[in-house]
Amino acid sequence: MKIIGTAKHTFSFFLSFFLSLLPLKSGCFLGAQQTDDIHITLEEAQERAGQQSISLQKSALDLESAAYSASHLWSEFFPSISANAGVSYGSNLFSNSGFTLEKNNSSYSASAGVSLSLNAGLPSSMRIITLAYQSQLLSYEDTKRQIGIQIAKAFYNLLAEKQNIALLEEKLVLARKQREKSAVAFKNGLVSERSDMQTQLAVENARLDVSRAAVLYESRLRDFLTLLGMDAASGQVTLDGAIKSEEASFDAEALIRDALPQRPDIVKQRQTIERLELTKQQKVLSSKAPSVSGSIQWRGGPGSASQRQFSDSITGSLSIAIPIDPWIPGAKSNQTLRNAETDIEKARLDLVNIENTAKNEIRNLCANARNLWGTIEIARMQVNIAERAYRLTERAFQQGAVEVLTLEDSRNALTAAHQQLLSAELAYKLGLLDLEAAVNIDLESEV
């Protein structure tokens, strides 16, 4: 009995110990789930944004409709087919013997017909449908590319903000190290209490800067993830990428010569001109050229009222219509054709304006890229100067030659120089993205 009681006691001890570990393991598992790292590259972000974009989804639906119409061009000359059937009954209501139900008073009818109308404007109509599909395809690709560029801008802005937090954290580390040195110097009577308190205040200011930058980054990151259809609470999100600052030289005139004809707005305007020309051609051929119409109709029903036997008939017709009024100058139909020519000329003028605007945009963006690279070079020199000045100021402070405020100013100047370099690199990257949008070419692959 003693052995059994001891075994029970041992078993209950291990059971209670195991049960006490379950919440801990469960908590560790949940904690691991909550801290899962999610890494997102620029390509993944662009793909997710494209899948979540309402405008791109609408454009895809329009493209699907246009593609369906373009694949069924035969419907433009498909004949009209109809079929009819009916029954009828006739009887007196108040006269003679009144309403009666008699078999001879009922009747039925059936008919079917096919009609076809052909005119010289049909080829132009079919070409307009095909052109509409090509235009919708261009709009879809352009929308997708513009979304990708906007996501890339937001992506690099977040990378810059994250790097700015790292700069502020480095500033905080420097302030803390200086605070530790100042505390030792104050105990040894080498610095005043005022200087020691100022180093402590510098640490708190640096910590506040880091906190503000982190809160702003988290807020903008949540907005960015919303565009991607992601929940920021699902885990720790990390953006994989870097802002590379490599000088890229572009010849504006070469870009204009090679890339201008493929710009979506210019291609779309040329398609508009072609569509207007086809519309005019369709109107001319439809209104001035002869049109041919043909039809076949079959009818069936009872014969004479006395015999009540089934009889049917089939009829066919063929006609040619020759319009006259469109050939008369000043007639309404003739004026419609003149207005179509006016629309074409206006579209051509719009094309010239779009091309000139695009050329100026490309030249300005190329010049802006060169200026931004010069800003990066200047910012790099400023960082080197600020780092050298901070080291000298820190050495002078340790020797008691300068005040702590001077050291703090030098440290702030070093952080500001790094931030200015970061801003210049970001502006250069965004400028290249704007140039990519203007020329509709991936410039990174061209460099």
Image (cartoon, grey):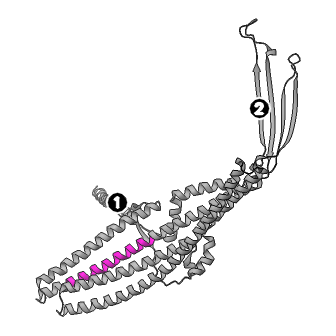
On screen, residue 264 above or below 167: above
Q: Amino acid at mark 2?
A: Asn
Question: Who's the residue at 77% across and 53% down the image?
Answer: 285
Quarter assignment of residue 25: bottom left
Closer to us: mark 2 or mark 1? 2
In the displayed structure, does residue 66 sit left or right of residue 411?
Answer: right
Question: Where the N terminus falls, by quadrant?
Answer: bottom left
Label total for image: 2
Q: Position of residue 342 (x, y in %)?
A: 65, 58
User: Which comes sooner in the sequence, label 2 or label 1?
Assistant: 1
In the rendered image, the vertical position of residue 89 relative to residue 388, given as above or below: above
In this picture, which residue range is highlighted in magenta? Answer: 155-180
Locate the C terminus by quadrant. bottom right
**Distance between mark 2 and mark 1 Cα atoms:** 78 Å
Q: Which residue is mark 2?
A: 84
Within 10 angstroms of label 2, few (less than 14), some, or many (20 or more) residues?
Answer: few
The residue sitting at the front extreme is 330
**Residue at horizontal 32 percent and vertical 71 percent from the top:** 213
Query: Taking the image as drawn, is residue 177 in sight?
Result: no
Q: Disc number at residue 22?
A: 1
